[in-house]
Amino acid sequence: MTTPAFGGEVSDFYQRFRRGYPAEVADELAAAFALSQVQDVVLDLGCGTGQLTRALAPHARAVLGMDPEPAMLDQARRATSLPNISWLLGADTEVSALLPIIGHGRLAAVTVAQALHWMDHERLFAAARPLLRPGGGIAVVTNGVPLWLQDTAWSAAVRDVVAAYLGTPPHRTGGTDEASQQRYATALAAAGYAVDQRVVEYATTLTVEEIVGGVFSAMSPEQLPAPDARPAFTARVRTALAPHGPLREAVRVRILLGTR
Ligand SMILES: C[S@@+](CC[C@H](N)C(=O)[O-])C[C@H]1O[C@@H](n2cnc3c(N)ncnc32)[C@H](O)[C@@H]1O
């Protein structure tokens, strides 16, 4: 939406309502980078509340979830107690500062899930390179098209309610659009990575509460309706969705791979 940030209550909506990743996504990443449970360390940058971090944990010796928003890391910590995950406060600009800690060629992968649009991707791709071991790489993951931008009648109805509430149509794609994907692929190749892609698709059915929670998870704290205004917002969404029957969603998780 306009200026999303992930602090305060937004982090709570994110943890409760943002969909996670099916096991096949982590399987694809493990296969692409030949991840070893015995020796590999993975950095999940922009980890948020840890949706992908958790999925990666069984495939690596250790996973480092890194994010600049303390509230998101706090939610991640509370939701996950896996012993091989560590949480680190930091942004894309601090990845090169990990070099003296992790060492040259010692990281198996950097994953950036639904977060690259917040970063300077060209600088990140260059900064990650010296950290990565041969055969390791960067994965840019997007978790389906935002709920309010899909090509279905129910998504258009959600879009209308959100546009009326914000006073402007929600347009942010979160890097899921073709132009962004192409830009990321081109930048990976320019930074010297071998580029490939994978797609994991599945279907799900959503409730009105899940759609409202998903919309709230994408607002900035300033945009969130006040607690006493949320029932009315939910009622507007419920009314708008009533004609559209089961709220089916076809989720297409895209994985852009840059192998070193
Ligand atoms: C949409 S969430 C994605 C969370 C999770 N990776 C997922 O797949 O659901 C985007 C995350 O990127 C983080 N972020 C924003 N700017 C960042 C930056 N410059 N460097 C690293 N992470 C950033 C935000 O704090 C937020 O937690």
Image (cartoon, helix red, strand yellow):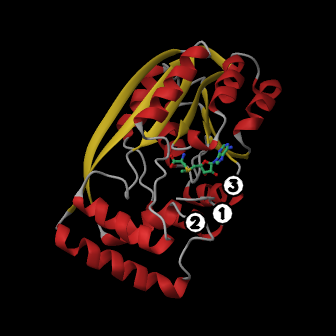
Q: Determine which residue is flagged by label 1.
A: 7
Query: Can you tell which mark lies on residue 10?
Result: 2
Whether tag 1 and tag 2 are in contact, CB under 8 A, the answer is: yes
Q: Specify whether residue 239 is in view.
A: yes
- Pointers 1 and 3 in contact (C-beta within 8 Å): yes
Between discs 1 and 3, the one toward the N terminus: 1
Q: CA distance from mark 1 to mark 3?
A: 7 Å
Q: x%, y% of residue 44?
A: 59, 38
Please give the name of the residue rendered at 73% of the width and 32% of the height, measured from the top-left corner.
95
Q: Quadrant of residue 193?
A: top right
SS under mark 3: loop
Q: Is 226 drawn above or below residue 251 in the view shown?
A: below
- CB at disc 3 and ligand 1 closer than 8 Å: yes
Q: Which residue is mark 3?
A: 69
Category of crowding for the residue at label 3, using alpha-carbon neighbours closer than 10 angstroms: few (below 14), some (14–19), many (at least 20): many
Three-letter residue code for mark 1: Gly
In the rendered image, residue 209, in percent from the top left (x then y), is placed at 36, 72
> In the structure shown, which secondary structural element does the residue marked by tag 1 occupy?
loop
Q: Position of residue 111 (x, y in %)?
A: 56, 33
Q: Residue at point 42% right, 84% down?
A: 231
Graded by Cα atoms within 10 Å as few (under 14), some (14 to 19) or many (20 or more), the crowding at tag 2 reads many
Depicted 40 relative to depicted 163: above or below: above
Q: Label 2, secondary structure: give it.
A: helix
